Amino acid sequence: MGTERQTAEIMVAEARKAFWVMVGFLAFIWLVQIANWAGGYALSRSFGIVARDPSGLPGIISAPFLHWSWEHIEGNSGPLFVFGFLAAYRGVVRFLGVTALIALASGLGVWFVASGHSVTAGASGVVFGYFGYILVRGLFDRHGIDIVVGLVMALCFAYQFTGLLPSDEFSWQGHLFGFVGGILGGWLFRDRRPRAAAQGEAARGVAGSAPKGLGRPDVTSGDPSRAALLKELDDLGL
């Protein structure tokens, strides 16, 4: 009971941090939008991703913070907050790693595939990356709640899948590669601990409750080398 309560408290604390991280992110891109709008969107033209132009590669970092109009940023803000929070609520540190991977995948996809010397800016690639990450995280982590969240998001935002198809109306390249980056992030940043930890706890429980002479020997007595071997097997979940 104590362990479950501690786990719940940690999740609540991480969710609270995730909420404020996304509030801060949105506040920042809206402040940038004000400055961008005041300057006639010169920031988007100067710091967006310029396709297949080596000088445009730094735009991979700056482009997600820039937009082309008020409608553009308004359309991205809602999904960005919802998907970003759901992607971050289990751990902000892992979320930041996933975000970096998504931004890199989306940006490089635009740089390689978009029309030559076209300029792309906007957070939609990151939005689609979070969407993809949410859909697969529960499967890779084997967390029931996250599987349900992924299914609900897939049903509620099914229209988002149309944004992965080629179109002249938006940067489908950023959407598609961001989505792929999110799926890759779900695999690379998957939680490897719960299953191993559960198996280790079960093995230790069996060893501790079995009478002497039955099951695994008591690892606290007997041959030290054998005890060390059994401990390593427990740590590996075997």
Image (cartoon, grey):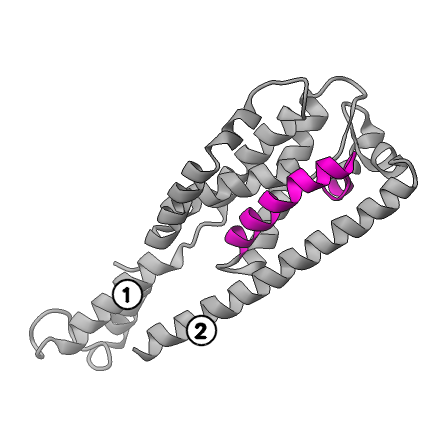
Tell which circle, 1 or 2, labels the residue nearer the N-terminal end: 2
Q: Quadrant of residue 234?
A: bottom left
- Is the residue under label 2 in contact with that under label 1 (CB below 8 Å)? no
Is 203 left or right of 91, judged from the image as shown? left
Q: Which residue is mark 2?
A: 9
At x 29%, y 63%, the residue is 198
| Percent of width and height locating residue 31 | 80, 52
Q: Nearer the viewer, residue 123 or 206?
A: 123
Residue 238 percent coordinates (x, y): 25, 58
Q: Is residue 236 visible?
A: no
Q: Which mark is residue 200?
A: 1
Left or right: where 40 falls relative to 85? right
- Residue 86 seen by the camera: yes
- Which percent across, then down, holds residue 142? 34, 50
Residue at the extreme bottom of the image, as rendered: 221
Q: Position of residue 32 (x, y in %)?
A: 81, 48
- Residue type, numbered disc 1: Gly
Taking 107 as reference, is 47 left or right?
A: right
Q: Nearer the viewer, residue 202 or 62?
A: 62
What amino acid does circle 2 point to? Glu
CA gap, disc 1 and disc 2:
23 Å
The magenta region covers 61-88
Q: Residue at x 33, y 79 (%)?
A: 2
* Prevailing SS of the magenta stretch: helix
